[in-house]
Amino acid sequence: MLRKYFFPDVMYNSVQDIDVEDLKKHGIDFVILDIDNTLVPYTSPVPDEKALSFLNSLTQNEIKFCFVSNNKLKRVELFNKQIGTYAISNGAKPLLTGIKRAMRAMGAKRENTALIGDQVFTDVCGGKRAGLYTILVNPIQECESRFFRFKRHYEKKIIKKYNSCRGRVNND
Ligand SMILES: [Mg+2]
């Protein structure tokens, strides 16, 4: 249950650590991207240089991408203004509605799509439920609100478990 829904396929410190060329080589043509704390901090209304260069590397490797954010329309629209790609707000992750809409919009299939996000209970869980290759990154900024701290507490437990399972696999 833990493994099926909450374990990412792979984990990185940040999106900048993802080997995009390798992703493409492994058959990924489409990427569903979380925005907040994955590409930029909550407080950045528009993409910064780091985010733009990551998005560029996707495009250079002929990987199409779509933003699927649980945040509001206004936030997502402003963030996507300069980029002008597919973007879905109120994505309701971990439900499949937003993810499926994104995949339909791009013409993506389960087998050639990856999902990248910073949260276990929304991003990873949504990606795994949709049957996608799921990449977890560390949140750019630790969130201060009590609810987020509560969620992080459990996320950290799951990540620890994930790492210990992976360690076992690697040692086999
Ligand atoms: Mg996020």
Image (cartoon, grey):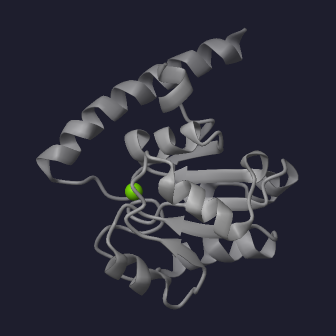
Left or right placement of residue 23 versus residue 126 in this view: right
Residue that sits furthest to the bottom in the current view: 82
Q: Residue at x 56, y 36 (%)?
A: 8
Residue that sits furthest to the left in the current view: 146
Residue 7 position within the rendered picture, expressed as x and y whole percent measured from the top left: 53, 30
Left or right placement of residue 120 versus residue 51 in this view: left
Q: Residue at x 65, y 54 (%)?
A: 18
Left or right placement of residue 124 versus residue 72 in this view: right
Residue 60 position within the rendered picture, expressed as x and y whole percent measured from the top left: 79, 75
* Vertical order, 168 against 123 (above or below): above
Q: Tell me if I can see residue 90 in this picture.
A: yes
Q: Residue at x 35, y 67 (%)?
A: 41
Left or right placement of residue 172 versus residue 168 in this view: right
Q: How many marks?
A: 0
- 138 and 59: which one is in front? 59
Figure quarter occupied by ligand 1: bottom left
Q: Tell me if I can see residue 12 in this picture.
A: no
Q: Which of the 4 image quadrants contains residue 66?
A: bottom right
* Vertical order, 109 against 120 (above or below): below
Give the quadrant of the C terminus: top right
- 134 and 93: which one is in front? 93
Residue 23 position within the rendered picture, expressed as x and y whole percent measured from the top left: 77, 53
Residue 52 position within the rendered picture, expressed as x and y whole percent measured from the top left: 57, 79
Q: Residue at x 19, y 37 (%)?
A: 150
